[in-house]
Image (spheres, grey):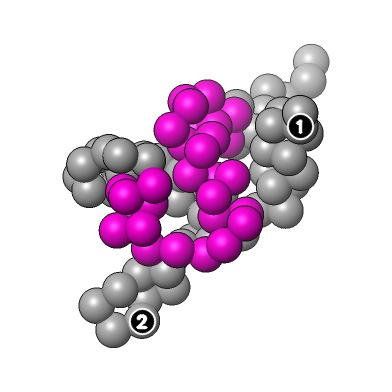
Amino acid sequence: MEDFKKYEGKAEVLKALAHPHRLCIVKGLLENKCNVTKMQECLGLPQSTVSQHLAKLKAAGIINGDRRGIEVCYSVTNPIVAEIVKIILEE
């Protein structure tokens, strides 16, 4: 019988991407690294909501934050996710 444990991590990544705001955040981060304030302005969401979405993306291993003084600059660190998002959002 196949070991389904190896699929759990993949499923968590897909669950993290399965929200329109998180897809939009990842797309924005692929275009340019940015902080929570810039994302908040772009998405029109409260800062706390953006932070919650970022926490889910970070927990899934999709993004990482680089602290620069009081600012945290986020970027997509998973190249497979980057390709998946590009394919999903192709027009």
Left or right? Give the position of 90 relative to 77: right
Q: Is residue 31 magenta?
A: yes
The label shown at residue 90 is: 1
Q: Earlier in the sequence, mark 1 or mark 2?
A: 2
User: What is the three-letter code of the residue carrying label 1?
Assistant: Glu
Q: Position of residue 73 (x, y in %)?
A: 42, 69
Q: Position of residue 52 (x, y in %)?
A: 29, 42
Image: 63 above or below 24? below
**Crowd band around label 1 with a 10 angstrom C-alpha radius: few (<14), some (14–19), many (20+):** few
Tell me the quadrant of the picture where the N terminus can be found: top right
**Residue, x 64% and y 33% (percent of image)?**
10
Residue at disc 2, secondary structure: strand
Q: Which sits in the foreground, 2 or 48? A: 48
Residue highlighted by disc 2: 68
Q: Position of residue 31 (x, y in %)?
A: 62, 57
**Residue, x 43% and y 33% (percent of image)?**
21
Q: Which sits in the foreground, 35 or 54? A: 35
Residue at disc 1, secondary structure: loop
* Comparing labels 1 and 2, the label whose residue is closer to the camera: 1
- The magenta stretch spans which residues? 13-42
**Residue, x 55% and y 55% (percent of image)?**
29
**Residue, x 45% and y 50% (percent of image)?**
58
Q: Is residue 55 magenta?
A: no
User: What is the three-letter code of the residue carrying label 2?
Assistant: Arg
Q: Position of residue 84 (x, y in %)?
A: 73, 37
Q: Which sits in the foreground, 11 or 37? A: 37
